[in-house]
Image (spheres, rainbow, N blue to C red):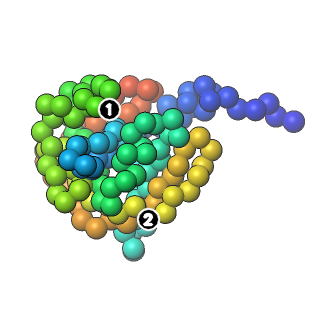
């Protein structure tokens, strides 16, 4: 019988898979709440669906879940400072960041792409909740370059 895979082994192996960097955010009770997310996945083109996953240990997730609409901002190379801000405690995470709120959905100004979503289905998946999300609006700035997460570090793509 094979030995159980540890969380450290899982993290190390998957660090070899590069992902984009995004921020999911919404306005709840007059405050912007949200967090960085590198789990954004395209699920379906018709109907348009994406997914995100949230750790059960997150203190932001239960608050974000209260919003009916969320904004997902795909970060570009000029957003490294945004990522540093998002490491702050949840209560001050968005202080000083330029954000645009449309309804309840909140977006980082100048994002490479914006995706407005409605939560559809929650699936309990190990130590995370996987959320299936209906896409209701989106936009992309083709002149911006992405930030990526690879080997547990933020990186820029080389041309």
Q: Residue 56: in sight, yes or no?
A: yes
Residue for badge 1: 90
Q: Nearer the viewer, residue 63 or 119?
A: 63
Q: Residues within 10 Å of mark 1 (few under 14, many from 20)?
A: some
Is residue 26 rendered to the left or right of residue 123?
Answer: left
Write down the residue under mark 2: 120
Of the numbered discs 2 and 1, the one sitting upstream in the chain is 1
Is 126 on the left or on the right of 54, as rendered?
right
Question: Can see residue 39?
Answer: no
In x, y percent, where is residue 45?
38, 69
The answer to whether residue 89 is left or right of residue 39 is: left
Residue at figure coordinates x 15%, y 35% from the top left: 97
Nearest to viewer (mark 2 / mark 1): 1
Structural distance between the alpha carbons of marks 2 and 1: 24 Å
* Image quadrant where residue 69 sits: bottom left
Q: Secondary structure at mark 1?
A: helix
> Which residue is at the front of the view, 34 or 80?
34
Q: Secondary structure at mark 2?
A: strand
Crowd band around label 2 with a 10 angstrom C-alpha radius: few (<14), some (14–19), many (20+): few
- Position of 103 relative to 56 (above/below): below
* Label placed on residue 33: none
Quadrant location of the N terminus in the rendered image:
top right
């Amino acid at each position: 019988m094979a030995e159980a895979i540890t969380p450290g082994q899982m993290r190390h192996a998957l660090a070899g898979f590069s992902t984009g960097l995004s921020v999911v955010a919404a306005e709840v009770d007059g405050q912007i709440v949200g967090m960085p997310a590198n789990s954004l996945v395209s699920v379906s083109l018709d109907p348009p669906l994406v997914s995100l996953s949230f750790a059960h240990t997150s203190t932001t997730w239960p608050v974000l879940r209260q919003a009916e609409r969320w904004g997902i901002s795909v970060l570009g190379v000029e957003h490294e400072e945004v990522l540093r801000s998002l490491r702050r405690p949840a209560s001050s995470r968005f202080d000083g960041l330029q954000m645009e709120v449309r309804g309840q959905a909140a977006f980082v100004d100048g994002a490479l792409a914006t995706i407005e979503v409605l939560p559809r289905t929650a699936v309990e998946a190990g130590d995370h909740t996987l959320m299936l999300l209906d896409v209701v609006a989106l936009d992309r700035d083709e002149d911006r370059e992405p930030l990526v997460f690879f080997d547990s570090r933020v990186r820029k793509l080389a041309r």
